[in-house]
Amino acid sequence: MYDFQEKKVLVVGMARSGQAAARFLANIGAQVTGTDLKTEEELGADFQELKKLPITFVLGEHPPMRAGTYDLVIVSPGVPSTIPLLKAAEGLGIPIWSELELAGRFIEEPIIAVTGTNGKTTTTSLIGYIFRQAGIDAVVAGNIGIPLSGEVEKIRHSGRKVRYWIVEVSSFQLECVQQFRPYIAVFLNVTPDHLDRHGNLMEYGRTKLRIFANQRPDDYAVLNLDDPWIHNNLPVLRSSSFWFSRRTLPENGIGVQDGLISFSREGRREILCPVKDVRIPGPHNLENALAGAAASLLAGIGIEVVAKALSTFPGVPHRLEPVGVVDGVKYVNDSKGTNPESVLKALDSFKEPIILIAGGRHKGSDLSELAKKIKEKVKALILLGEAAPIIRDAVSDEGFTNIWNVASLKEGVQTAAKLASPGDVVLLSPACASWDMFRDYEERGDIFRQLVKEL
């Protein structure tokens, strides 16, 4: 294991995962410097607790990178690898790890890791739920909003005996992994997202494929048979491939046949449950359910436990989350819908007339398919944030005209309430990142939930 005692470590990015990494490193004896272009005031209350530790901070700018200054750099997910500081570290041959890589070096138990453009949090949470139903002690962490290094530190101090780690991982985290090795790696799907950072779909997808880089023959890769990018670009893997599909039953995998979810392995087929028993709504969530079930079954959890969990798992906040009914109008929080593909799936989950609240910071994705779907499914479109003009232009090109621009989410919810009739759905599914107006998608969703309560 890497010896951190007295090692000089620079942590770049002082948001949630950066703070967790800095705290962990300081507590295991490293000489830590934390840096962020934000000021102390911008970093918020949690940062004040971090200041109590023996950590040096360089805020509002980055420190100079010179030979011998640092032994290791830990980079937070939100920090692009192209910034001059990281390029300088790379040029000096200084190792650059993600917070995921750092935490993974201290985990001895099996890891189940989940990546993909859409559905990561739902699938990760479902696997954690299945493990709890089975009475298995597992940690759920990662890109789900719980920094993995923070959980590793808690477990080290508590003496708790964990059997599995269930980790959501993003493309940003996978950019800087070296030894991170999941026992079961789940790859859900690839659709255009974060192209402002990765440049193109191929590079984005290849970054996600790094989840399999260190797997061995006795590990598993759980893959979406219905996803064309995965099917067409999957390299030869050292791990065993296990497929899932909502359209068919793979020869070695889990899928749907005659309205039943079945599990096929080594020539044996076993039925889990009818598709209609899956509680979380929508065809995309059926895929998430299949992937979560596959990972759990491969980990040795019994079919009966998995089937019962699929029928009782309620979903997670900010993903098609019903937050209230006011005057016969249903309000749904899908703040995690941060790209066009996820909003397409959200819109297809409802048969009722939809008033869509969208907008935020555009991530470079093509909006043409979403614009067509909006014309087909949406009664009224309410736009806010930096991307409002971009989305307006896209839907206007399709001939959709019932568009309302608002200056805030509060105004958006109030406008939706005025436009809605009993039986309608008001859906917050932004198709954009939240960073132009909110700290993250969770804050955006929480505010939406509160505004609905105030109607």
Image: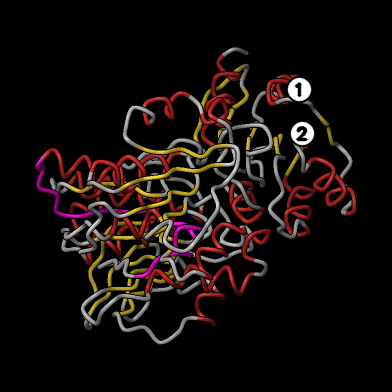
Mark number displayed over residue 415: 1
- Say whether marks 1 and 2 touch (CB < 8 Å): yes
On screen, residue 407 versus residue 67, left or right, reads: right
Region in magenta: 159-178
- The Cα atoms of the two marked residues, 1 and 2, are separated by 8 Å
Q: Where 147 sits versus 194, above or below?
A: above
The amino acid on which the numbered mark 2 sits, given as a three-letter code, is Ile
The single residue placed furthest to the top in the displayed view is 454
Between 338 and 200, the one nearer to me in the picture: 200
Q: Report the quarter where the N terminus lies.
A: bottom left
Residue at 74% in and 21% down = 411
Q: Position of residue 430 (x, y in %)?
A: 66, 41
- Mark 1: few, some, or many residues within 10 Å (few <14, many ≥20)? some
Residue at 33% in and 42% down = 313
The answer to which image quadrant residue 217 occupies is bottom left
Secondary structure found at label 1: helix
Q: Report the quarter where the C terminus lies.
A: top right
**First in sequence: mark 1 or mark 2?**
2
Q: Where 405 sits versus 313, above or below?
A: above
The answer to which image quadrant residue 157 occupies is top left
The amino acid on which the numbered mark 1 sits, given as a three-letter code, is Thr
Between 179 and 8, the one nearer to me in the picture: 8
Q: Position of residue 129 (x, y in %)?
A: 27, 45
The residue wearing badge 2 is: 382
Task: Residue 173: say if magenta.
Answer: yes
The answer to which image quadrant residue 372 occupies is bottom right
Residue at 50% in and 63% down = 89
Q: Is residue 61 visible?
A: yes
Q: Position of residue 249 (x, y in %)?
A: 38, 74
